[in-house]
Image (cartoon, rainbow, N blue to C red):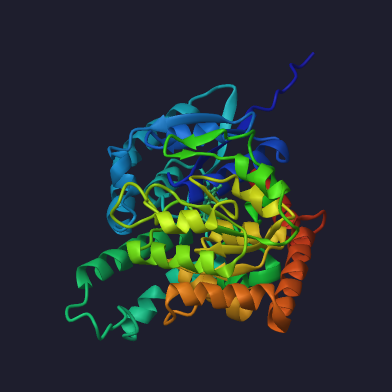
Amino acid sequence: MAPLLRRRRRRVLLLPLPYHGHINPMLRLAAALHSRGGLAVTVVHTETRAAEARRILPPGCALVTVPDGLTPDQLAASNDVPAFVTALNRNCLAPFRDILAAALGEEEECVVVVVADVDWYAPLAAAREMGVPALALMTSNAARFRVYLGYPRLCEKGYLPVQDLHVMVPDTARHVAYADLLDRIVAGVRQSSGLILNTFDGIERADIELIRRDTCIPVFPVGPLHALSPAAPAPAQLSSDHPEDRSCLEWLDTQVQGSVLFVSFGTLATIDADELTELAWGLAGSNRPFVWVVRPRLVRGRDSVDLPCEFLKETRGRGMIVRWAPQEEVLSHPAVGVFVTHCGWNSTLESMSKGVPMICKPCGGDQLGTARYVGDVWKVGVRVGVNDKLREGIQVAIKTLMAGKEGEAIRNRMKEMRDVVSKCIGKGGSSDLALQELIDFIDLS
Ligand code: UDP
């Protein structure tokens, strides 16, 4: 009798960029590929921040680390993106090749595809060279990726770098480094076998379509990734810097439905010491209950935050300050009525999927564009005026959103948005179908 042909186990290697806002969506994708696609999954992570990834690693997925030659402080220095992304690509390339080569040498299984964050242009190229299809994951939105695609033309036409009348000498070196990085990223994606987007048709159909046409590669808009698979089991502590404080959930249980402001600026965004004080007094003056995530490094250039004693006294019992909140759970809590956010893409998607209207106070990068979409295009939030003093700006925004006709319309649109998200990820919805296409695509690889 002929021996039974056993199908080799099919494995996917996933490489997130080592930042929480990138790790989390990649690991949610890992969970979906494992549980729904039946694929074996290995997450390849830089040694720095590997503990963070390990804590939220989905069940059934493996994690291996690569040396990155960077210190956690270098990774935390978010103000020189081109330098550290380039260094990561340079330092991790050889160890990544070794891991892929070892995985390809396994007899019992085969590596069918590598999925890497768009920023990992070197490992994406290495996978292709080693004969493994490479897929890129953009953890931010489609509009942002279109900016990447259009960046050279914006430079050619003289729109970039933006001429700031207040700056006598424009930072040309920084601009050139950024343009160069985007060039590499876009070239890497164009040569990939496909692009996975953490967004959904319901909000970015036109941008998604334009990316398809421009890149001529398969595009899979499977987002919001956090909604496709549940959070990995209780990340009790994200890092020693970020002990998760679940007491805010109990406190929320004692508050009136829709009354609480949740204030959080993600994992990296920083504000000036003046802005911190302004924000504090803005919250105090709103007379609303609030949960405020104050990370130790929230204030630019400092390792700890001192809130004014008078502010703490005035808001005692009404305001809760935490260093790190279980954000998705907080946003799901019925007591939360408004999300004051920096408009990081994950936070924006989480807010939309929970139907919580937003007050946008972007701090830089893609947050500026996202805030604009939230306020002016999707109309599910309000932006704090750029020329307003933060204290007044926050108070006006809170009033607009929590009282009056305009606020009611925004709140209603956000409820509709929650339904749009739930349709997209539900059976037969656009993201559900895109995920199935992605799994089928990997199956044929
Ligand atoms: N987050 C959290 N608790 C906090 C603050 C942030 O769980 O106290 C999570 C949040 O749910 C989101 C991520 O951290 O998933 C932040 O990602 P985002 O893209 O919004 O911002 P970034 O940190 O990348 O600027």
Whether residue 90 is visible: no
Residue 358 at x, y = what percent? 61, 68
Whether residue 14 is visible: yes
Query: Vertical placement of 267 versus 379: above or below?
Result: above
Q: Residue furthest left?
A: 169
Q: Could you tell whether 225 is left or right of 310 in the image?
A: right
Residue 170 at x, y = what percent? 21, 77
Residue 387 at x, y = what percent? 42, 82
Residue occupying image coordinates x 74% and y 77%: 408
Residue occupying image coordinates x 34% and y 61%: 273
Q: Residue furthest right?
A: 427
Which image quarter holds the C terminus?
A: top right
Query: Vertical placement of 347 versus 366: above or below?
Result: above
Q: Could you tell whether 155 is left or right of 286 in the image?
A: left
**What is the quadrant of residue 382 in the picture?**
bottom right
Residue occupying image coordinates x 68% and y 72%: 402
Total numbered circles: 0
Residue 115 at x, y = what percent? 53, 46
Which image quarter holds the N terminus?
A: top right
Query: Vertical placement of 263 versus 130: above or below?
Result: below
